[in-house]
Amino acid sequence: MSKIKKIINYKFKEFNSFNQNEVKAANAVVKTGILSEYLAGELEGGYYVKKFENKLKSFFGTKHAITVNSWTSGLIVAVGALDLEPGDEIIVSPWTMSATATAILHWNCIPIFVDIEKDTFCLDPKKIEKKITPKTKAIITVDIFGQSSDIHKIKKIARKYSLKVICDSAQAPGSKIGKNFTGTLADIGGYSLNYHKHIHTGEGGILVTNNDYYAKKMKLLRNHGETHNNLNNKLLINNLGYNFRLGEIESAIGIEQLKKLKKITKGKINVANQLSKKLSKLPGIKTPIIRRGCSHVYYVYPIIIDKKINRKELFNILNKLGVQGLSEGYQLLHKLPMYKKKVAIGRKGFPWSISKRKINYNQIDLNISEELHNRTFLSFEICLFDLKKKDIENISICFKKAWKILKIKY
């Protein structure tokens, strides 16, 4: 292979959703001298926390919206709100970041990994039922990359077996399934406000629910799990609380960010559509598939390449040509040491020792996830950049050049 001449000789402009509105909002809070108004035993936060939560529940159309200091915290309190017992099992996708599964471990419960759909990368409803046991109590579905999982089919299964459903919609704020926002049709849903998401507060998370009990429980868990109010005893059972509170500055910034969400997602969709129009013409490549009746907000632009194409070679060539933001494969949770080596399974003193069921995570059938990770999945992180028409055209030129170098023909 001859020396590859770089085509993109500049850095893509970084995406930045902040302007003077966020600066003014933060300054206004600082001038008050009140950065947090939480007290021990209280369920609610301060002025800006309450205002932000009211804006959120109005935007997403839910009865409750609860802020926390990260989406990892959100997942932990969401699982905690279900009042599960040690050894209970929760079905979850392996194709996501670690917090989705470790939130389960925080409550001495057991993650049961189920494979994903090949085209959408979301939890596959057709594979859920065979993993349900008498210990199964919930399903965590992940609305990965920016679109909803098949929540209607998942909820149908959940009703059949009396299971609860949590939607990890960290990467999909503003996307829709039908007329509903992704994440709002589950018992509990939520979104990330981490700095590289569509909107952000640096760190932060949003929980949404229409269930009064879950809302109270989650507010308790984010604030140490203690209260001076007269609450029913059930709310205080297994009530291991944390300091997961979002501050006043972050909430004030969040109010300004929420105003921009529709415009930001519209921009990401526009970029993705332009990319798909150009890249879909190449042989051996599958651009994003959008579930019928859903919208996709493209935290990540996912690509599947044919098995005949050497992904490592393609990745290296595209990098040399100047394409930024590419990644090979994705996270496979069941391959992390704590699962693969079974360091915590059945060993005395570890959480999972309370369960007599020993799970060999090395023998779980997750063929779709593993094939995508090992051979055919390539992602472009739209979230990182503010891409213009020139950038999209240059990315397209680089892909065409890579296909020419590798002599990919069908």
Image (cartoon, helix red, strand yellow):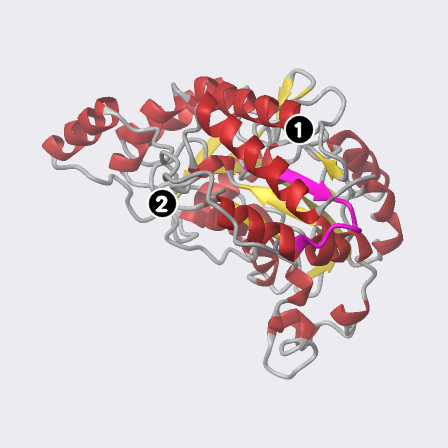
Location of residue 174 with respect to 249 vertically, above or below:
above
User: Does residue 71 belong to the magenta stretch?
Assistant: no
- Extreme-front residue of the structure: 2
User: Does residue 307 belong to the magenta stretch?
Assistant: yes
What secondary structure is found at the residue carrying circle 2? loop
* Numbered circle sitting on residue 185: 1
What residue appears at the point 81 percent right and 64 percent down from the top-left corner? 364
Instruction: Give percent across and percent down for residue 333.
Output: 64, 60
What residue appears at the point 38 percent right and 19 percent down from the top-left corner? 259
Find the magenta span and give its range.
300-311
- Extreme-right residue of the structure: 130
Q: Quadrant of residue 185?
A: top right
Q: Which residue is mark 2?
A: 245
What secondary structure is found at the residue carrying circle 1? loop
Q: CA distance from mark 2 to mark 1?
A: 25 Å
Q: On the rendered image, what quadrant is the N terminus found in?
A: bottom right
Instruction: Give percent across and percent down for residue 233.
Output: 54, 49
Location of residue 163 with respect to 146 vertically, above or below:
below
Residue 152: in sight, yes or no? yes
Q: Amino acid at mark 2?
A: Arg
What residue appears at the point 15 percent right and 30 percent down from the top-left corner? 27
Nearest the camera: 406 or 286? 406
Label 2 crowd (10 A; few <14 / some 14-19 / many >=20)? many
Q: Quadrant of residue 20?
A: top left
User: First in sequence: mark 2 or mark 1?
Assistant: 1
Instruction: Give percent across and percent down for residue 260.
Output: 39, 20
Q: On the rendered image, what quadrant is the C terminus found in?
A: top right
The number of discs equals 2
Q: Amino acid at mark 1?
A: Leu
Q: Is residue 326 left or right of residue 286?
A: left
